[in-house]
Image (tube, grey):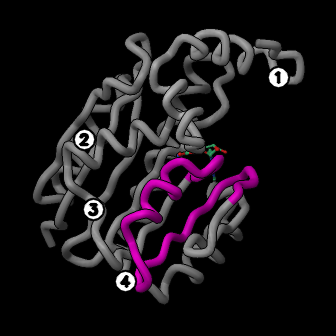
Amino acid sequence: MKYKKFSKSSKIWLKRNSINKNVLISKEKKLVSRSWFKIHEINLKSNIFKNNMNIIDLGSSPGGWSKYASKYIKNKGNIISCDINNMKFTNNIIFYKGNLLNKKFLKLFLKKISIYNIDVLMSDMSPNISGNKCVDNCNIINLLNLSFKICKKIFLKNGIYIVKAFEGTYLNKYIKILKDFFINVKIYKLKSSYNSSRELFIVGKGTIR
Ligand SMILES: C[S@@+](CC[C@H](N)C(=O)[O-])C[C@H]1O[C@@H](n2cnc3c(N)ncnc32)[C@H](O)[C@@H]1O
């Protein structure tokens, strides 16, 4: 396989994944991204998606999670997705392009979603990795705080929050904050993540207050 048109990091990823079983199946089924397998695994563990849900997808591009959730919601549900990057999307997905760390855009996005009773807020947002540990950790924490801030603004009693986090010194503190907010908090290391990856996923269900 030739990788000429891809960036250096994409070439490394593609080379590694030409022998990755998930990616081969994903090509066969024409799925959007490797992320599809992660949300599938989370759904199998936590039984999240149901008919007619209203779902927010933060950091949604290229669209794996939105596409996965869209199979469940049927006619009355909605998926509202957002990313800095463009995304191809189908009829039952509403997509907003913008940076959620930008206060003006965040305000607009919150206004748009305020008309829905939200059942699920999922965030797979991750920053561009700079290689500087301090900067990268700081960017990760900013995104975690951002998605939880949105979560607190929109959640009714029985909402579900799915968020990608990374092992690091701040993680226990973040989990504690979620445990003070949700009745049930689960932490998953996924088989579909690389063994070497520090990523993990947290699912919070049902708010305490
Ligand atoms: C791992 S990808 C998400 C993959 C996606 N869940 C899927 O299934 O296709 C992470 C995404 O987070 C987005 N992102 C990072 N920071 C963001 C921000 N401040 N606002 C909006 N999107 C952001 C990136 O642009 C990137 O597309």
Mark nearer the N terminus (2 vs 3)? 3
Secondary structure under badge 3?
strand
The image's mark for residue 117 is 4
Q: Nearer the viewer, mark 2 or mark 4?
A: 4
* Placement of 139 over or under 46, stated as above or below: above
Residue that protrudes farthest toward the right in the picture:
5
Q: Name the residue under label 1.
A: 6
Q: Residue at x 40, y 76 (%)?
A: 74
Magenta residues (range): 59-88
Tag 2 residue: 175
Residue lying at 13% horizontally and 67% vertically, measured from the top left: 208
Nearer to us: label 1 or label 3:
1
Q: Where is residue 13 in the image (x, y as percent from the top left)?
A: 64, 17
Mark 2 vs 4, N-terminal side: 4
Q: Earlier in the sequence, mark 1 or mark 3?
A: 1
Q: Which of marks 3 and 4 is nearer the N terminus?
A: 4
Query: Mark 2 or mark 1, which is nearer to you?
Result: 1
Q: Which amino acid does label 1 sit on?
A: Phe
Residue receiving disc 3: 160
Real-space Cα separation, disc 2 to disc 4, in angstroms: 25 Å
Dot 2 lies on which element? helix
Amino acid type at mark 2:
Ile
